[in-house]
């Protein structure tokens, strides 16, 4: 059946994130990597804050995994040190924002594994620790 909601977002996707037995079966992966605006967390925060607006009917405990890919070790030593420092500060900033939120899991990786590697690593963690997950959103 259809439902009307005066607060609905016309671009939102409605999902049912619990199976009929009440088990949460949906997870979300957000990939990120080093960008020049780090250590700012603004872009990641905007994505996280938009989840409940754009994917309606999510269970409030639907897990969100934020992957942080390592950068390529190219350039001179000073550039590498600067990127490393800003990425490290970015990770700390994310932990400071989301550590008290049991829904959000920060997954920093030590090797540059690209988007595919980051998603695969997150899926491995989801499979081990959230075995009831049947649906996955990649943002």
Image (cartoon, helix red, strand yellow):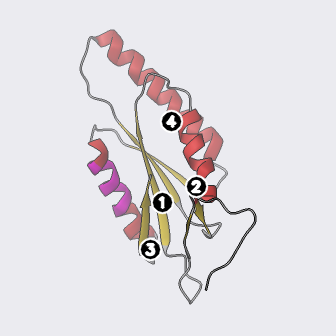
Q: Is residue 39 left or right of residue 112?
A: right
- Numbered badge on residue 28: 1
Label whose residue precedes the other's in the sequence (2 or 3) = 2
- The structure residue drawn at horizontal position 34% and vertical position 35%, both measured from the top left corner, is 70
Identify the residue under disc 2: 51
- Asked if disc 4 and disc 3 are in contact, CB closer than 8 Å, the reply is no
Q: Nearer the viewer, mark 2 or mark 1?
A: 2
Work out which quarter of the rendered image holds the N terminus and state it: bottom right
Q: Nearer the viewer, mark 4 or mark 2?
A: 2
Q: Position of residue 20 (x, y in %)?
A: 56, 89
Label whose residue precedes the other's in the sequence (4 or 3) = 4
- Asked if disc 2 and disc 1 are in contact, CB closer than 8 Å, the reply is yes
All told, the count of numbered labels is 4
- Numbered badge on residue 133: 3
- The structure residue drawn at horizontal position 57% and vertical position 89%, both measured from the top left corner, is 21
Which type of secondary structure does the marked residue at label 3 adopt?
loop
- Numbered badge on residue 72: none
Q: Quadrant of residue 11?
A: bottom right
Label whose residue precedes the other's in the sequence (1 or 3) = 1
Identify the residue under disc 4: 91
- The structure residue drawn at horizontal position 53% and vertical position 26%, both measured from the top left corner, is 39
Which type of secondary structure does the marked residue at label 2 adopt?
helix
In the rendered view, would you say 139 is above or below 16?
above
- Asked if disc 4 and disc 1 are in contact, CB closer than 8 Å, the reply is no
Q: Position of residue 19 (x, y in %)?
A: 53, 84
**Is residue 102 at least partly visible in the picture?**
no
Which type of secondary structure does the marked residue at label 4 adopt?
helix
Q: Which residues are magenta?
A: 116-124
Q: Quadrant of residue 61?
A: bottom right
């Amino acid at each position: 059946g259809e439902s009307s909601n005066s607060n609905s977002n016309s671009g939102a996707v409605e999902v049912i994130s619990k199976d009929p037995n009440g088990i949460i079966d949906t997870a979300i992966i957000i990939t990120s990597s080093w960008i020049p605006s780090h250590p700012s967390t603004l872009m990641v925060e905007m994505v996280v804050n938009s989840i409940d607006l754009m994917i309606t009917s999510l269970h409030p405990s639907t897990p969100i995994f934020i992957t942080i890919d390592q950068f390529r070790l190219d350039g001179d030593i000073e550039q590498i040190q600067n990127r490393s420092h800003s990425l490290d500060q970015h990770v700390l900033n994310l932990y400071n924002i989301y550590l008290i939120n049991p829904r959000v899991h920060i997954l920093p990786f030590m090797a540059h594994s690209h988007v595919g590697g980051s998603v695969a690593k997150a899926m491995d963690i989801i499979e081990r620790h959230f075995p009831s997950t049947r649906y996955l959103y990649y943002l």
